[in-house]
Image (tube, rainbow, N blue to C red):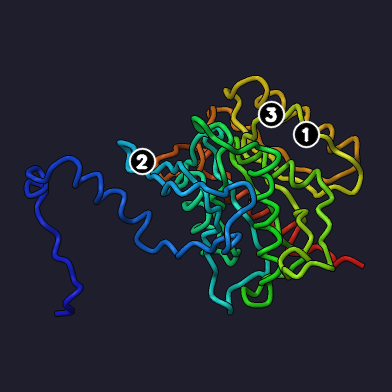
Amino acid sequence: MNRLTRVPLPVSHYASIPHLLLAALRASPLSAAEPDPILLWPHGAAGSEGQTAPEKVETTKSGERNLTSIHQPSLVPYLPPQDKSKGVAIVIAPGGGHSKLCIDHEGHNLARWLADRGVAAFVLKYRLSREPNSPYRLEDHAVADMQRAIRLVRSRAADWHVDPHKVGALGFSAGGELAFLAAMREGQGDSASTDPIEAQSARPDFQCLIYPGKSGLIEITKGMPQAFLVCGYSDRQDIAEGLAEVYLKFKRAKVPAELHVYAAAGHGFGVRDSTPGATAKWPARLEEWLADRVLNASPPQ
């Protein structure tokens, strides 16, 4: 018998295992195959000088993890096998109100799902502007982390079998703010920089906004990255109604956009096996949209 084979034990056996151990067993599949993170700035990020507190992980009762105390922003890469790669990459920014990162149901779960379908996915661990006593600001530090992540992916496009013109930003809730703010900025690369990453453009080629916060701040002009939009009917007004207004802004600016509003959903559904009904299928709609609008898109002239 292979030494790694596990023989199932009767349910009664688990009754004696402490509650915390059971939680760890439930959580372990989420982290067992988690790749090592790649620092966005190996020598330290500007604005994080003197911040040496370690990253903190809190595990919820359901076994999902939340991260805080992020001072070394990084990317966790999920790469499909070379022979299955579709050449598309997505940087994923989890939500958490800028005070934490809901790293599993709004990060790793979707990244694994995408990689299984040939899309390179990168979970962004960005700095938190609303954590107690945070030295960071959303538009100065968190958005800079998203921009650097996009640049990093483009700089290693050949290594990761990605088309540098098919790199998108996807954000859940607060992470959606990072995605649309990066899309709203020109983000031109600095060809004179000694850092090859900084020579790349920081503007995503497409944006996926999943129940994004502060939708009223989204401004659309002609030539901006196209969008995939998702929210729940029962979400708060600025999202459930605000995202419909955002869709109309895209329409008026003649920027292609696709909107999905799920009647049985509220806020924060993310990607979970436990999500019921049609809401659970939204990643499949994303896959279809990528096929229609990104995979088959004509290369820039």
x 49%, y 41%: residue = 101
Residue that numbered label 1 is attached to = 218
Residue that numbered label 3 is attached to = 214
Residue at the far front in the pictured view: 50
Residue 264: x %, y % from top left: 53, 28
- Pointers 1 and 2 in contact (C-beta within 8 Å): no
The quadrant the C terminus occupies is bottom right
Query: Alpha-carbon neighbours of circle 2 within 10 Å: few (<14), some, or many (≥20)?
Result: few
Question: Spatial distance from mark 3 to mark 1, Cα to Cα?
Answer: 8 Å
Question: Spatial distance from mark 3 to mark 2, Cα to Cα?
Answer: 26 Å
Residue 230: x %, y % from top left: 64, 38
**In the figure, residue 167 lies in which quadrant?**
bottom right
* Residue 103 in view here: yes
Residue at the far top in the pictured view: 237
- Pointers 3 and 2 in contact (C-beta within 8 Å): no
- Pointers 3 and 1 in contact (C-beta within 8 Å): yes
Q: Who is closer to the viewer here, 77 or 1?
A: 77
Residue that numbered label 2 is attached to = 58
191 sits to left or right of 61: right
Question: Spatial distance from mark 1 to mark 2, Cα to Cα?
Answer: 32 Å
Helix, strand or loop for disc 2: strand
**In the figure, residue 3 lies in which quadrant?**
bottom left
Q: Who is closer to the viewer here, 23 or 284?
A: 23
Query: Alpha-carbon neighbours of circle 3 within 10 Å: few (<14), some, or many (≥20)?
Result: some
Please report whichever mark, 3 or 2, sits nearer to the chain's N-terminal start.
Answer: 2
| Residue type at numbered disc 2 | Glu
Helix, strand or loop for disc 1: loop
